[in-house]
Amino acid sequence: MVIIKSKKRGLSVEEKRTRMMEIFFDTKDVFQLKDIEKIAPKEKGITAMSVKEVLQSLVDDGMVDTDRIGTSNYFWAFPSKALHARKRKVEELQNQYSDYNQKKENLHESIKKSKVGRQDTEERAALIKELTALRQKKDQLKTEIDKYKECDPDIIEETRQANKVAKEAANRWTENIFSVKSWAKRKFGFEESKIDKTFGIPEDFDYID
C-alpha cells in the first residue's frame, strides 16, 4: 500500500466563517477578541491573522452579536438567533435575486423586440450592457445566498458529524497500517524506517487527534 502525502489546502473564507460559528455554537459562551484569537487557530485551524477579519464579517452579516462593556468588546452568537438572522438574510437575498431575474427576462424581451426590422441601435447596445450588469448581479446574489447556507447551524452539525465519521474511519485505517508494520517487523525483521520508505509512509504518519 502506498500512502501519498498531499499538500495541505488552506481554508476558504466560508470554511473559516463556518468554523468560527462552531466556536460560539459549541460553547454558547461570550468571548473577547483576544479569546477568539487564541481558540480559533488552535481548535479550528483559522490563521491568527485572519481571525479579526472573519469575526468582523460575521458581525456585519448579523450572525454574531457584539457589545462594548467598559473598555472591552464582547462577542457571542446562539444557534437560534443565528438561524433567524440567516433566514432573514437569505429571504432578503432571494427576493433580490428574484427581482433581478425578472428584470433580466424583461430585458431579454426588449432586446428581442429591438432586433425586429432594425439594425443595431444605441438603445439595443444600452439594453445589452444593462443585461450584462444584471447577470453579474444575479451571480453575485447567488454566491451570497450560498454563503449563508454555510453558516446554517443544521449544516454545521451535519458537517461536524460527517467529519467525526471520516476521522474514525481514518484512524481505523491508521490502526490497520500500524498493525501490518508491527507484523512485518516481527515476521521478517524489517526496520520501521525501511517499511516506511518502501511503502511511502510519511515520517509524521499518525492518528488524527
Image: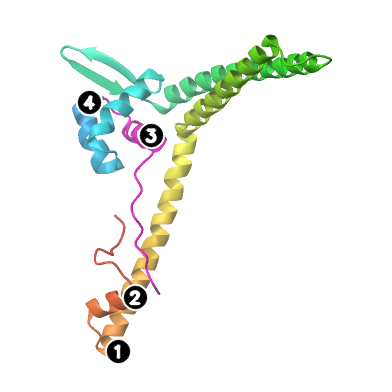
In 3D space, how far apart are the residues under numbered discs 3 and 4 (Cα atoms)? Answer: 18 Å
Label 1: which secondary element: helix
180 over 109 or under it: above or below: below
Which label was assigned to residue 187?
A: 1
Q: Is residue 94 visible?
A: no
Disc 2: CA contacts within 10 A as few (<14), some (14-19) or many (>=20)? few
In 3D space, how far apart are the residues under numbered discs 1 and 4 (Cα atoms)? Answer: 55 Å
Which label was assigned to residue 33?
A: 4
User: Looking at the image, is mark 4 or mark 2 nearer the viewer?
Assistant: 2
Query: Label 3 amino acid?
Result: Val
Q: In this image, 209 relative to 133: left or right?
A: left
In 3D space, how far apart are the residues under numbered discs 4 and 2 (Cα atoms)? Answer: 45 Å
Q: Is residue 108 visible?
A: yes
157 over 196 or under it: above or below: above
In 3D space, how far apart are the residues under numbered discs 1 and 3 (Cα atoms)? Answer: 49 Å
Residue name at image x 39 percent, y 65 percent = 172
Query: Label 4 amino acid?
Result: Leu
Disc 4: CA contacts within 10 A as few (<14), some (14-19) or many (>=20)? some
Q: In this image, 159 relative to 91: left or right?
A: left
In 3D space, how far apart are the residues under numbered discs 3 and 2 (Cα atoms)? Answer: 36 Å
Disc 3: CA contacts within 10 A as few (<14), some (14-19) or many (>=20)? some
Mark closer to the chain start, 1 or 3? 3
Closer-to-camera residue (29/119): 119
Magenta stretch: give its range: 1-30
User: Looking at the image, is mark 3 or mark 4 nearer the viewer?
Assistant: 3
Label 2: which secondary element: helix
Residue name at image x 31 percent, y 78 percent = 198
The quadrant the C terminus occupies is: bottom left
In 3D space, how far apart are the residues under numbered discs 1 and 2 (Cα atoms)? Answer: 17 Å
Label 4: which secondary element: helix
User: Looking at the image, is mark 1 or mark 2 nearer the viewer?
Assistant: 2
Label 3: which secondary element: helix
